[in-house]
């Protein structure tokens, strides 16, 4: 039995082109979803690192406050507040770049920098080429005798990974409008309190 010529025919050019078009549309969608997933993962990782840095700076301030013990001198704040380098660096209630421990000191020869690399490690220079995250602190007295202080840590980093940031973006004094500059930077905030250590 002979098959008709119509049954032996293959796909037409129009059918092949339509199939290729549908395949291309599906592929573009998958690629767009992949790009969004990669960007989302990168953003989540950066947010996690920045949150860890903010918590670390609050812990540094709390550790630093253990050196702040009562003084027999009747002054406000107590005269030995200077022993707490980070806490005593700026009590004006304004944002500042913490630099008290940027120079290596003591037997451990370590630093506590306001600048961090992509992995969240302290960098020894606030103009380093590997600088990614920056920290500002704001310390505000909560009591009239200044034995209880509110400590705020602000971590910020440039939004665009493909463009190198200004090498001084971490070292310069924080401006009052930095918080509103959300087109250039991401921000993470953490808030805590420290108090005078009552044990001498």
Image (cartoon, grey):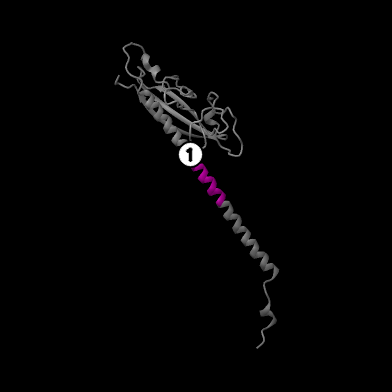
Rendered location of residue 100, percent (x, y): 46, 22
Rendered location of residue 52, percent (x, y): 44, 36
Q: Residue 120, relative to residue 78: is it above or below?
A: below
Image quadrant assignment for residue 39:
top right
Q: Nearer the viewer, residue 80 or 21?
A: 80
Q: Quadrant of the N terminus?
A: bottom right
Rendered location of residue 45, percent (x, y): 49, 42
* Mark 1, other Cα within 10 Å: few <14 / some 14–19 / many ≥20: some
Q: Nearer the viewer, residue 197 or 129?
A: 129
Left-right relation of 49 to 164 = left
Image quadrant assignment for residue 80:
top left
In this view, the residue farthest toward the left is 199
Q: Quadrant of the C terminus?
A: top left
Rendered location of residue 108, percent (x, y): 42, 26
Q: Residue at image x 54%, y 47%?
A: 38
Q: Nearer the viewer, residue 43 or 67?
A: 67
Q: How many marks on residues?
A: 1
Q: Main secondary structure of the magenta part?
A: helix
Q: Residue at image x 59%, y 29%?
A: 167
Q: Which residues are magenta?
A: 34-48
Q: Residue at image x 58%, y 51%?
A: 32
In this view, the residue farthest toward the bottom is 1
Q: Which residue is labeled 1 in the image?
A: 47
Q: Is residue 42 magenta?
A: yes
Q: Is residue 51 magenta?
A: no
Secondary structure state at the residue bearing disc 1: helix
Image quadrant assignment for residue 127:
top right
Q: Residue at image x 68%, y 83%?
A: 4
Left-right relation of 197 to 36 = left
Q: Nearer the viewer, residue 104 or 55?
A: 104
Q: Residue 69, relative to residue 54: is it above or below?
A: above
């Amino acid at each position: 039995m002979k098959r008709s010529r119509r049954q032996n025919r293959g796909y037409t050019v129009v059918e092949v082109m339509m199939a290729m078009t549908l395949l291309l549309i599906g592929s573009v969608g998958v690629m767009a979803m992949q790009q969004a997933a990669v960007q989302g993962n990168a953003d989540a990782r950066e947010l996690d690192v920045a949150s860890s840095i903010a918590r670390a700076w609050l812990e540094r301030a709390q550790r630093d406050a253990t050196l702040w013990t009562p003084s027999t001198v009747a002054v406000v704040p107590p005269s030995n507040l200077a022993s707490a380098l980070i806490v005593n660096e700026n009590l004006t209630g304004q944002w500042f770049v913490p630099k008290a421990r940027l120079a290596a000191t003591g037997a451990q020869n370590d630093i506590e920098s306001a600048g961090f690399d992509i992995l969240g490690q302290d960098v020894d220079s606030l103009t380093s080429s590997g600088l990614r995250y920056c920290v500002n602190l704001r310390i505000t007295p909560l009591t009239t005798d200044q034995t209880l202080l509110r400590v705020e840590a602000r971590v910020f980093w440039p939004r665009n990974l493909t463009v190198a940031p200004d090498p001084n973006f971490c070292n310069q004094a924080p401006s009052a409008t930095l918080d509103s500059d959300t087109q250039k930077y991401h921000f993470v905030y953490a808030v805590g309190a420290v108090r005078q250590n009552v044990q001498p």
